[in-house]
Amino acid sequence: MKFRIGQGYDVHRLVENRELWLCGVKVPHTHGLDGHSDADVAIHALCDALLGSLALRDIGYHFPDTDPAYKGADSKKLLARVMQLVRNEGWELVNADITIMAQSPKLKDYIDSMRNTLAVVMDKEPGDISVKATTTEHLGFEGRKEGISATAVVLVSKE
């Protein structure tokens, strides 16, 4: 059996008059993330980790923000397409670990829903997906509530 790992990172600015989507779950908040798609920073980091594990470039290469087809796109659909690319190459996700950095809102009450949502989209068990959230103790752009960032690490395998 062969294994590969991938790592992803993404960041989006918080703005007024946008919905906040994280790991495919709408989170009530005064601000949302700015971006061409729904700006789900956690799914974008996860897509980059999956693509990176197989050296398939990055999310911007596959779904460019210059393409009007992706304006307002649901990131869950982008993730499903990335999973299909991974499976088309003969690989399967073993596990994923995602960390969301946000001073607010507090995300602990949404973690289970996030894990379940990602599991459905990726056709995996919720136990294969870890989602964590942390503040930055008021440091940096996350701490100043200017934006949210996310990292993701994945392990994929192939027989």
Image (spheres, rainbow, N blue to C red):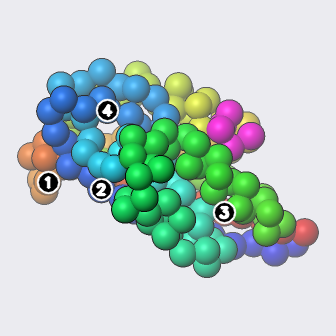
Residue type, numbered disc 3? Leu
> From the viewer's perspective, is residue 72 above or below residue 8?
above
x%, y% of residue 59?
A: 49, 63
Element class at badge 2: strand
Residue 85 in sight: yes
Disc nearer the start of the sequence (3/2): 2
Establish if 26 lies above or below 94.
Answer: above
Q: Are marks 3 and 2 in contact (CB under 8 Å)?
A: no
At mark 1, the secondary structure is helix
Q: Which one is earlier in the sequence, the residue at label 2 or at label 1?
A: 2
Between marks 3 and 4 in the image, the one whose residue lies nearer the viewer: 4
Q: Which residue is mark 3?
A: 155
**Element assignment for label 4:** strand
Front-most of 84 and 97?
84
Magenta stretch secondary structure, dominant: helix
Task: Report x, y in % for residue 29.
Answer: 24, 25
Kind of residue sitting beneath label 2: Val
- Residue 129 vs residue 17, the one in the foreground: 17
Instruction: Say which residue label 4 marks.
Output: 20
For mark 1, does the 10 Å Cα neighbourhood hold few (<14), some (14 to 19), or many (20 or more) residues?
some
- Circle 4 residues within 10 Å: few <14, some 14–19, many ≥20: many
From this viewpoint, is residue 151 visible? no
Sort mark 3 into few (<14), some (14-19) or many (20+) by Cα contacts within 10 Å: some
